Amino acid sequence: MTEENLNPFQIVQQQISDAGKYLGLDSAIEEILKEPKRVLEVTFPVRMDDGTIKVFKGIRSQHNDAIGPCKGGVRYHPDVTVDEVKALSMWMTFKCGVVGLPYGGGKGGVICNPKELSQGELQRISRGYVEAIASIIGPDKDIPAPDVYTNAQIMAWMMDAFSRLQGSNQFGVVTGKPIIVGGSLGRDKATAQGCVFVVIKAAEKLGINLNGATVAIQGYGNAGSQAAFLLNKLGCKIVGLSDSQGGIYNPDGIDLDKVYEHKSRTRSCVNFPGSQSISNAELLELPVDILIPAALENQITANNAARVKAKIVAEAANGPTTPEASRILYANGTTVIPDILANAGGVTVSYFEWVQNLMNYYWSEEEVFEKLRTIMYNAFDNVYAASQQHQVDLRTAAFIVSISRIAEAIKVRGHV
Ligand code: NAD
C-alpha cells in the first residue's frame, strides 16, 4: 500500500507494531492496543434557528483506560469519520503515555459545519452531544477538550450540560474551559511552551546554540505564533513564517511584533513589508536550524523530505510527517521531535486544569509552566534514552516509552 492510501487508523496500527517489535510486546497486548476499548456513535436532534429539527451524528472513541480516565478533544467538522476519531483517540493514549500523565486516550467528533451555524445552534449541538454521550464521560471516566473548530465557549456549554444532568457543578468533566469556570492559566500557551521545552533539550543534545539559531514555522496560528514568540525570547532568529495564504522569508529575521500587527490587520502574514514571498512548500525547505510544522498533517512527505535542511523538526502539529518521510529524515540525520511528544504540552496543561478542578485550588501561570517544564524535560530524556538504547528515531522511541507504560498497567491489572 502506498503512503498516500494509508488512513490514520492504519498508520497508528503500524506505529504500534513497529514499537512493539523492540519491546517484545505480548501479542495479546498488541491486539488490545490496536483497537479502541469503546466507540459510541450517537445521533441527536437539534432545533435550528429557522424552527426545523436537524439530526446530527456524533462519535466518542475511548481507546484505553488502563492507567487512568480517557482524555482527548472533540472536533466539529463536516468530514469527521469514525476511523479518524478512532485513530486520534489512539494517538491520545500514546501522547499521554509518553509524558507520563495518568490518562488514556479518547477523542470525539460531531459531523457538522461550524461555519454555517449560529452561536445558538452551536450551543444546542454541544448540549445535545454531551447529553447523548453523558453515560460514558465524567471526571473519572473520560474528559473531553477542544480540538478543531471547538473552543473554550463550547467547553463551557458542555460542562454546564453535564453538570445539569448530574445536579451539581462538574468542572472536571472537560478541560480547555474559560478561566472563570475552572480553566487553567497558561492553557492558551501550553502547546507552544511544551514544544519549546523539548526544542531546548534537543538543541542541547545536538550542540546547537539557540541564541542566533534560525527558525521557520509553518502555520502562524495559535501554536505557531506562540512558539515564534517564545523562541525569539530565547535568542532564536525567526526567518520564515506561513499561514494558509502563503509564506514569508527574511534571512535577517522577522520582526514578530510588526508581523503580528500586520496579521491582525490583513488576516495573513503574506506581503509583510521587507520579506520575500514564498510558498508553504518552500518554507519547509528553508536553510534553517529548526523547522516547526504547526499547521496541518501530511506536509513532509516522501516527495520533499530529502530537501528538508533543518537539523531539528519539532512537530507542533499532529501528523505533519508521513511514515516514509520520517524514515528519510532519520536516514539524513535530522532530529524529528514527534508530535506525541512535541505537542504534548497542551494535554499536560489540560491535565493540570483537571487536577486544579478536583482540588478546587488554582495555580499561578508561573507554577503551571514550572510543572510543565519538569514533565517535558523528563519526557524528552526518557524518549532520547530509548532512542539511544534501541538505535531508533525519536518517534519510535516515544512509542516504545509510552507503550511499555501502558503494557505494564495492562499486565499488573491482570487483563492478559
Ligand atoms: P490554528 O488554527 O490556530 O492555526 C493553524 C495555522 O495553520 C493557521 O495560521 C492557518 O492559517 C495555518 N494553515 C492552515 N492551512 C495551512 C496550509 N495549507 N499551509 C500552511 N499553513 C496553513 O491551530 P493551532 O491550534 O495552532 O493548531 C495547529 C496544529 O497544532 C494542529 O495540527 C493541531 O492539531 C496541533 N495542536 C494544537 C494544540 C493546541 O493546543 N492548540 C495542541 C496539540 C496539537
Image: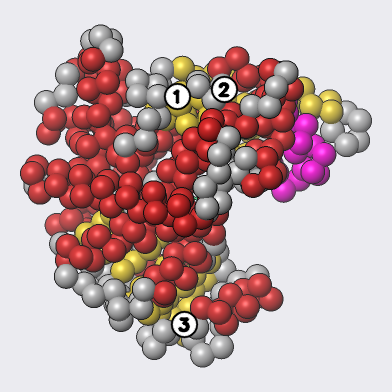
Residue identifier under label 3: 254
Mark sitting on residue 14: none
Mark sitting on residue 138: 2
Q: Residues within 10 Å of mark 3 (few under 14, many from 20)?
A: many
Mark pair 1, 3: CA separation = 43 Å
Q: Nearer the viewer, residue 295 or 359?
A: 359
Res 281 → quadrant:
bottom left
Does residue 224 show up magenta in the picture? no
Residue identifier under label 1: 69
Does residue 116 show up magenta in the picture? yes
Disc 3, SS: loop
Q: Which residue lies at the image location 37% right of the left edge and 61% below the top edge?
A: 196
Res 10 → quadrant:
top left
Q: Residues within 10 Å of mark 1 (few under 14, many from 20)?
A: many
Disc 1, SS: loop
Q: Which residue lies at the image location 42% right of the left edge and 43% below the top edge?
A: 348
Is the Cβ of the residue at disc 2 closer than 8 Å to that at disc 3? no
Q: Which of label 2 and label 3 is nearer to you?
A: 2
Q: Would you say 221 lies left or right of 341 here? A: right
52 above or below 268?
above
Q: Magenta-highlighted stretch: main secondary structure?
A: helix
Q: Which of label 1 and label 3 is nearer to you?
A: 1
Q: Would you say 254 lies left or right of 188 here? A: left
From the top left corner, tell me how far across and down residue 357 is, in percent: 56, 34
Residue type (three-letter) at the residue carrying disc 3: Ile
Which image quadrant: the C terminus? top left
Q: Is residue 78 visible?
A: no
Magenta stretch? Answer: 113-129
Disc 2, SS: loop
